[in-house]
Image (cartoon, rainbow, N blue to C red):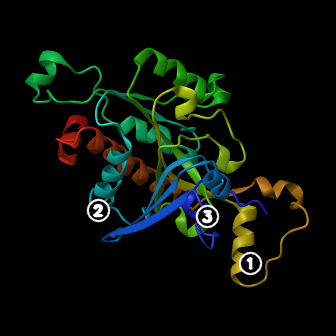
Amino acid sequence: MNFRTDLALECREPLETLPEGLRCDEESFGEIRVTRVIVENEKGARALGKPPGRYVTLELPPLGEYADVYGEALDACARELRRLLPPEGAVLVAGLGNDGVTPDALGPRCCSLVQATRHIGGELARSAGLGDLRPVACLAPGVLGRTGMESGEHLAAVARKLKPAALIVVDALAARRLSRLGRTVQLSDSGIVPGSGVGNARQAIQPATLGIPVISIGVPTVVDAATLAFDLLERRGLAAEPEREPEGGAEGMMVTPREVDLVVDRAARLISMAINCALQPHLEPEDFLALTA
């Protein structure tokens, strides 16, 4: 059975030993566990089913229950993101997804909370005590059904005009295990293929296609129903590999937690603040809250 997941950690778990071309290490910070999977070459990419690059997974307390997104989770997210970013230069932040569908609204909601600074310069920045701001531009390109444009086409055009040093892309993800919904953040420098986790892959947004570093950030908000059912049965020793796909289109159904609105809201606040802190390390979270108040 084809298990749908966007998480490199879940692609790594079935491998009993690490094949050539794959490296993995783990680290803990209080309640936060960080797993880094590095795909070094094409051999490793074939084994993992992911393109070469660095994949960092942060396992957090459940965002639906854990209201404080400005503690250890924020520090860990900002620190790992900073390691993936070029040290200087303008950055374009893009929020992918459909803001009218809650499980897919993470990207647009996050983008609305990132502090855009590209327009702040000169005397205005100095008078506000913000003379060292890194230029940041934000964009929520919408979805193909509304705009008639692939997100990748939209971002490629904007990147050609702005010439940023890097692109940060935020999107909702799909996981294999229900326990990872709303409590996992994945960062990667391999880019992203929007919709791949829900069987609706769109144009790739990757360093090779845009010509600049592309860092993706996401939180899983959905699980494929067939994958979830098989996983739950397998844990009880009842599952067998299905001979055919289920009838009635069940293979296209996605499951999301009932508190998904709360999860998406807190995930958007966590990721947006991590982006702010990673790009403007001389400012504190309270400074960004004051700027957006």
Residue type pointed to by label 2: Glu
Q: What numbered label is drawn on residue 72?
A: 2
Where, by quadrant of the figure, is residue 118 drawn?
top left
Q: Whole-percent x and y of residue 110?
A: 42, 41
Q: Residue at x 29, y 62 (%)?
A: 72
Work out whether mark 2 precedes mark 3 in sequence or the reverse, and give the earlier one.
3
Where, by quadrant of the figure, is residue 152 drawn?
top right
Callouts 2 and 3 close, C-beta under 8 Å:
no
Q: Whole-percent x and y of residue 32?
A: 36, 67
The answer to whether residue 277 is above or below residue 7 is above
Residue type pointed to by label 3: Pro
Residue type pointed to by label 1: Leu
Q: Whole-percent x and y of residue 15?
A: 63, 69
Work out whether mark 3 precedes mark 1 in sequence or the reverse, and give the earlier one.
3
Residue bearing mark 3: 19
The answer to whether residue 162 is above or below residue 284 is above
* Crowd band around label 3 with a 10 angstrom C-alpha radius: few (<14), some (14–19), many (20+): few
Q: Residue at x 75, y 84 (%)?
A: 237
Q: Whole-percent x and y of residue 86?
A: 34, 36
Q: Secondary structure at mark 2?
A: helix
The answer to whether residue 224 is above or below residue 133 is below
Q: Secondary structure at mark 3?
A: loop
Q: Residue at x 76, y 63 (%)?
A: 226
Residue bearing mark 1: 233
